[in-house]
Amino acid sequence: MSDEPKHTPHRAPRPGPWATLPTMAPAGSRAVTAPADRTARRIAPSPLEPGATRDPYRTYRVLREEFPLTHDPLLRAWVLSRYADVAAALTDARFTHGHRPGDPPCAEIHSDFDDADEAELRAVAERTAFVLARRIADRPRADLVADFCHWLPAGTVAAAVGVPYRDMMRLVRGRAASALAGQCTAQIAVREKALAGFLADVLTDPDQVAAFRDAPAGLVARAWTESLRREPPVQIVMRRARGEIRVSGGTIPSGASVALLIGAAGRDPERFRDPDRFDPLREDPDQLTYGGGPCPAVTLARLEAEYALRALFQAMPRLRLVDGFRPERTGVITRAPRNLLVRPGG
């Protein structure tokens, strides 16, 4: 009998769940210009992978270029990342719909929303913004996220429905808020994040600060739309396919969950010129955070952005970021700066 050890046949490692997914090639006329080290990629990256919270846009770019339709086990959904697909899915009746302020359901609920209503909302947004700005004007240092953005959307709604200032945080997310805009008031937290991102975009660049100190409302509105496009406060929304639906890269199965990457769509170079750049004067503006129909929540968000700048620059003409501070956005499903440190007196 031999003393030599017995050798067992070599077994290849069992493939993980990612390896069994179909490889999705880009569809349409878009050419793939991926570097050589990415041409052999077999597995689609996930927006939920570690590190994506700091910079999801690299992942989004790979998905748009190489995997316009892929199944993500972490999201438990099929993923759409190109502008054409995402924009269509947000309004296509073949997808179930969540509540996005400004979509057709808002138009039905607020069909009587007219100029008089907007004038009233404008007045409360202006008043609330100036009250908050004056409260922090004399401080040596402030955090606009905690001291301003967190309060303006809630305070505006409270003022619009007559809730006393001292009670606004207790009531504004419940009965009082529902009296103004129904389901749309669930978006108060989104408006907080959107406003923080907008102020970060303006204050980060000294040239932008100078341009917006006395900017007309039209320019502020364009900058607001641009901020929502480039860094949307809601990055991913979920839908379900009502039937088989053909999109870029393949067909979504009937009944499947679908993740719409709003953040990826907003930086699609097939739709936007130089999409990574914040450009308030761009000739191809658009955003997917809000729909285009009449809705008090959408109007309030725009007015809050306008009067936030007016109030802050009027109360603090020398307002600037703290030396060495740069706003850093975080988050996967929703995304915004955690803080925005400023020196009110310059």
Image (tube, rainbow, N blue to C red):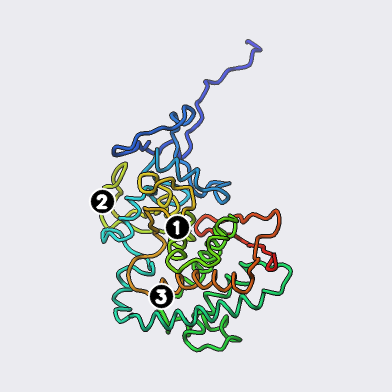
Evaluate if marks 3 and 2 touch, with contact meaning CB atoms under 8 Å apart: no
Q: Which residue is mark 3?
A: 183
In the rendered image, the residue lying farthest to the top is: 2
Q: How many marks?
A: 3
* 1 or 2: tag closer to the N-terminus: 1
SS for dot 2:
loop
* 3 or 1: tag closer to the N-terminus: 3
Inspect the image, locate mark 1, and give the three-letter code of the amino acid beneath it.
Answer: Glu
Mark 3 against mark 1, which lies toward the viewer? 1
Q: Quadrant of the N terminus?
A: top right
**Residue 172 on image: x %, y %:** 52, 81
Q: Residue at x 29, y 79 (%)?
A: 111
SS for dot 1:
helix
Q: Residue at x 45, y 63 (%)?
A: 219
Evaluate if marks 1 and 2 touch, with contact meaning CB atoms under 8 Å apart: no
**Residue 119 on image: x %, y %:** 41, 81
Instruction: Return the residue nearer the eye: 222 or 185.
Output: 222
Image quadrant assignment for residue 98: bottom left
Question: Which label number is shown at residue 191?
Answer: none
Give the crowd class for mark 1: few <14, some 14-19, many >=20 residues within 10 Å: many
Give the crowd class for mark 3: few <14, some 14-19, many >=20 residues within 10 Å: some
Q: Which residue is mark 1?
A: 226
Q: Residue at x 58, y 50 (%)?
A: 54
**Residue 344 on image: x %, y %:** 68, 68
Q: Is residue 177 above or below residue 29?
A: below
Inspect the image, locate mark 2, and give the three-letter code of the amino acid beneath it.
Answer: Glu
In the rendered image, the residue lying farthest to the right is: 140
Inspect the image, locate mark 3, and give the three-letter code of the amino acid beneath it.
Answer: Gln
**Residue 14 on image: x %, y %:** 49, 33
* 3 or 2: tag closer to the N-terminus: 3
SS for dot 3:
helix
